[in-house]
C-alpha cells in the first residue's frame, strides 16, 4: 500500500540555519504530495503541495520539489526562525479507484533556538 | 470565522462511558474526515464521508460510529470508551474528492480516558 517515510526527529537548529527534512514515498501511480505543519496545541495546516512530477511547492520561505525519479519530496528552508518550531508532516493522496486517503509520515519535530 | 470547528476541545471521562465529538465546516466542502493522532504524533485516518455518504472506513473498532446529518457536519460517537482511545481526534474537510485537493483541519479534540 501507499506509505510515506520522513526523517526521524527531533531536529534542533539555531535561528537562520538551513533546514532540510527528508521525505520519500511509495505509491501506486502518481500521487499528490503535501507538507503540513502542526504548531503546538493546534490542528494541521497545509504548508505547500505539488500535484505532478517536477512541480515545486512553496510557501512562507519553505520549498519542496516533487521528484518522481527518486520518489522524494524533501522540505527545505534557507533561514529558519523561532516561529517555525512545529511538527512537520509529509503526506500523499492518490485518487485512484476508491482510495482517497491522505497517508501521513510520522512527523518531524523541529525546534529552532534563538 | 473558524473554517473547521470541533467541540469539545478537551474531553476527560471514565472508561466504559459513551461520548460524542462534533465537527462542523463552513467552507462549503463536500468531503469530511476523522483522524486519530496518538501520543507519538502519528496520524491515521478513521473515516471519510463524501456528500453524507461513507467512503472510507478504516480498521476501526465498531464502538466508533460516525454520523453525517448534512454535508457540513460529521460527528463521531464512541461507545464503551477504553484506555487505548486516549488520543487527539482531528476532523478535516476538503472541497471534494478531486485529485490533489488539500484537506483543512480543525484544532483537535484531546480525549483522555481515566
Image (spheres, rainbow, N blue to C red):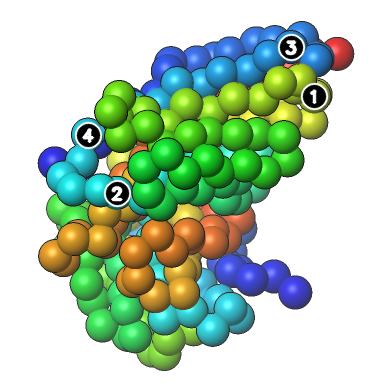
A97 sits left or right of B77 in the view: left
Residue that label 1 marks? A81
Secondary structure found at label 1? loop
Query: How far apart are the alpha carbons under marks 4 and 3?
Result: 30 Å
Q: Position of residue A80 (x, y in %)?
A: 75, 22
The answer to whether residue A98 is left or right of residue B99 is left
Instruction: Say which residue label 4 marks.
Output: A26
Query: Which image quadrant is residue A78 in?
Result: top right
Of residues A57 and B23, the one drawn nearer to the viewer in this rendering: A57
Q: Earlier in the sequence, mark 3 or mark 1?
A: 3
* Residue under numbered circle 2: A31
Quadrant of the rendering where the C terminus of chain A is positioned? top right
User: Mark on residue A17?
Assistant: 3
Cβ atoms under marks 1 and 4 closer than 8 Å: no
In the rendered view, tell whether residue B99 sits above or below residue A6.
below
Give the structural element (helix, strand or loop) at label 3: loop
Amino acid at each position: 500500500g501507499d506509505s510515506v517515510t520522513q526523517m526521524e526527529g527531533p531536529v534542533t537548529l539555531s535561528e537562520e540555519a538551513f533546514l532540510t527534512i527528508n521525505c520519500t514515498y511509495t505509491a501506486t501511480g502518481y500521487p499528490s504530495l503535501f507538507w503540513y505543519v502542526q504548531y503546538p496545541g493546534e490542528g494541521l495546516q497545509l504548508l505547500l503541495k505539488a500535484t505532478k512530477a517536477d512541480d515545486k511547492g512553496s510557501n512562507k520561505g519553505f520549498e519542496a520539489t516533487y521528484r518522481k525519479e527518486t520518489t522524494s519530496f524533501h522540505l527545505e528552508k534557507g533561514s529558519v526562525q523561532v516561529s517555525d518550531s512545529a511538527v512537520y508532516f509529509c503526506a500523499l493522496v492518490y485518487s485512484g479507484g476508491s482510495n482517497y486517503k491522505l497517508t501521513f509520515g510520522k512527523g518531524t519535530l523541529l525546534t529552532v533556538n534563538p | 470565522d473558524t473554517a473547521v470547528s470541533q467541540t469539545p476541545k478537551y474531553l476527560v471521562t471514565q472508561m466504559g462511558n459513551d461520548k460524542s465529538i462534533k465537527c462542523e465546516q463552513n467552507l462549503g466542502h463536500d468531503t469530511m474526515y476523522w483522524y486519530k493522532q496518538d501520543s507519538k504524533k502519528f496520524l491515521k485516518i478513521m473515516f471519510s464521508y463524501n456528500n453524507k455518504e461513507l467512503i472510507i472506513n478504516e480498521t476501526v473498532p465498531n464502538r466508533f460510529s460516525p454520523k453525517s446529518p448534512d454535508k457540513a457536519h460529521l460527528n463521531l460517537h464512541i461507545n464503551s470508551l477504553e484506555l487505548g482511545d486516549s488520543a487527539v481526534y482531528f476532523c478535516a474537510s476538503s472541497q471534494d474528492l478531486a485529485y490533489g485537493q488539500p484537506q483543512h483541519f480543525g484544532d483537535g479534540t484531546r480525549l483522555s480516558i481515566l
